[in-house]
Image (cartoon, rainbow, N blue to C red):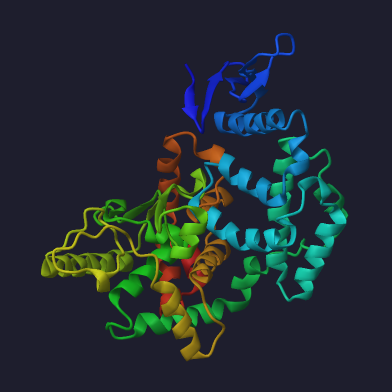
Amino acid sequence: MGKKIDKFNVKDNNDGTYSCRLSIGYRKDPLTGKTKQYRPTLTVTASSESEAIALLTLEKIKLYNKGKNVVDQLTMSDVIKRYYEIKTSLRANTRVKDLFYIDKINKRFGTENITDIRFNHILEFLYALEKHGYSKTTLRNFRNALRKYFNFATRQKLISENPMIQLTDYDIGKGEDTMKHRSESVSDDVKKVIRYIMKQKICRSYSLEHRVLILLTLEGNLRPAELYGLTWNDIDLTEASMEINKDFSSFTTKEAEKANLPRTVIDDTKTRGSHRLLPLSSITVKLLTSFKKECDSFLKRKGAKNPGKYLFFQKQEVKPGMVVKNACGSGLKSKLYYASKYLQVKPISPYDLRRLARTERENELELKDRVNKYVIGHVKDNDTADPRYITTMYSAAKKSHPIWEKILMSIITENNVNKTECKTN
């Protein structure tokens, strides 16, 4: 028996095909003239059940339209909607980030038939965006978004020719990601902001939590989603280690409604290669120990509970007897911004901390490229298939950690560590 999904009783034939008996209403028998129910059985080739349902939907509409090609009726907006219906494994963060590009693309192409859109229309659209002042990075993201939608339409045989292929010879939207090289030009400013925050007296404006956020980001080259996804179960203060195994994302009400998602989402890490176990420095362990005591004392004073054992949660919203239900995905970004503004340097973001840590590791640590990629979370997915892999790489990272610890201290304090001494000790 098949599984009933979206009014389709789909049967997996276990040969790469799926079958379904459709109900198309009633038709007259051409011989007798009597009206009878029309229930043809259709078979499609698909890689998954969700893809089969999408294809069967097209076939059903074709039959409803008495053989008229439904592709001629599909708009760009329809194709984009179908893309996200089928791509059920897409991370929540990706879906929300795509909303910005979807809005602009739909504003221009949303009501146009997918078969009527030509490469010159896309080219004119990208040039208009450039003229409007969008950065090279944003233009590249628009081009990538259009590519994935038209590639999807081509794979689903919704269009016979992909207009993005003809766009290959044009440089518009091929701009290099300037953010990848940003750390090289602003590393001194990043250190300046970090040192300013770290030397401030602990108070509400510059709390212990802010210091912990900075240190953990530097220690693990953490993405913001990885940082806020940490729980106390992921921290081993005795072993001086932390495990990065999930992402936390929070969205505005408008974003959540548009993407049909809850306000907060716990996801797997960005890739399987982002799952890692890393050593912690003594200063980080010391501040984490104090921070844990501070959090436990706060919860006890409020009579509140934190069953999820989140490291970071919105303390201002915790009321007496309340149960903390979600992690908090904010705090560090605004603190870095205001400190940058006060010091009159370019605004620093949490990603700049990650880039700084990566640059320092690559420049100062004589590690194999594979170990560096592991620490940063850039290992290819297939490299992590062996469960022994993380243990092996953790041991390799731990051997070089004393050197990294000195480099970390040179980042957060004014006293620079002699780089040569770091490498030779």
Counting labels gives 0
In which quarter of the view is residue 160 placed? top right
The quadrant the C terminus occupies is bottom left
380 and 267: which one is in front?
A: 267
Place of residue 228 in the rendered image (x, y in percent of width and height, measured from the top left): 38, 61
45 and 2: which one is in front?
A: 2
Q: Residue furthest top?
A: 31
Q: Residue at x 40, y 61 (%)?
A: 227
* In the depicted structure, whether residue 227 falls above or below residue 22: below
Seen in the image, is 362 located left or right of residue 332?
A: right
Seen in the image, is 159 located left or right of residue 35?
A: right
Place of residue 355 in the rendered image (x, y in percent of width and height, measured from the top left): 54, 66
Q: Residue at x 39, y 82 (%)?
A: 197
In which quarter of the view is residue 292 placed? bottom left
In which quarter of the view is residue 54 placed? top right
In this view of the protein, can residue 425 be seen by the observer? no
402 and 206: which one is in front?
A: 206
424 and 151: which one is in front?
A: 151
Place of residue 303 in the rendered image (x, y in percent of width and height, measured from the top left): 11, 65
* In the depicted structure, whether residue 378 falls above or below residue 196: above
In this view of the protein, can residue 360 be seen by the observer? yes
Place of residue 409 in the rendered image (x, y in percent of width and height, measured from the top left): 40, 73
Q: Residue at x 70, y 56 (%)?
A: 110
